[in-house]
Amino acid sequence: MKLKRGLLYAGAIIVLSLLIQFGVLPLLEPLFDGIRAMWWIEWIMTGFVTLLVAKWYFKQDEPTLVKGIKLGILPAILLAALPMWYSDLWGVGLPYWKVYVTPIIVFVLTAYAGFEFDQTYTKREQ
């Protein structure tokens, strides 16, 4: 795994995830009735962004499942730590479990991207 590209990947995932949470979802909130729909929209958008940025990362580096797992660890840890940081900043308690589904989605989809892109990469090379 290339460290510079890995850090760029993690930064892109963090920035785009925060953009979804604090930029896009507040605009969509009047369109949907419940909070549950907003979580599902966030998770779907985060999954799409994760696969898109993973495709960018694996364009320069050969994809494998192990590289996908290694690549997914850093943004997942940072996304899990962010809610704790801004809950302390705003003086509210720790957020509930739905906040921690996003890092799991990022990790699993990054590992899957390494695996799936490896399947298509090796078929293309043969």
Image (cartoon, rainbow, N blue to C red):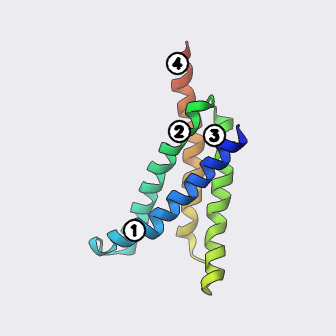
Judged left or right of residue 1, residue 83 is left
User: Residue, x 47% and y 67% (percent of image)?
Assistant: 21
Q: Do residues under tags 1 and 4 come within 8 Å of each other at their CB atoms?
A: no
Q: Are marks 2 and 4 in contact (CB under 8 Å)?
A: no
Q: Are marks 3 and 2 in contact (CB under 8 Å)?
A: no
Look at label 2 and name its amino acid.
Trp
Left or right position of 1 against 83: right
* Image disc number at residue 56: 2
Instruction: Compute the Cα span from label 3 to label 1.
Output: 28 Å
- Between the C-alphas of marks 4 and 3, the distance is 18 Å
Find disc 3 in the rendering and name its residue.
68
**Given the image, on which type of amino acid does mark 4 rest?**
Lys
User: Quick one: label 2, few (<14), some, or many (20+) residues within 10 Å?
Assistant: few
Q: Earlier in the sequence, mark 3 or mark 2?
A: 2
- Tell me if 39 is positioned left or right of 27 in this view: right
Q: Earlier in the sequence, mark 3 or mark 1?
A: 1
Please name the residue that numbered disc 1 is placed on: 25
Disc 3/disc 2 C-alpha distance (Å): 13 Å
Asked whether the beta carbons under mark 3 and mark 1 sit within 8 Å of each other, the answer is no
Secondary element type, mark 4: helix
Rendered image quadrant of residue 1: top right
Rendered position, 101 above or below 83: above
Label 2 or label 4, whichever comes before in sequence order: 2
Given residues 62 and 65, the one toward you in this image is 62
* Circle 4 crowding by C-alpha within 10 Å: few under 14, some 14–19, many from 20: few
Q: Earlier in the sequence, mark 4 or mark 3?
A: 3
Looking at the picture, which amino acid does disc 3 mark?
A: Gly
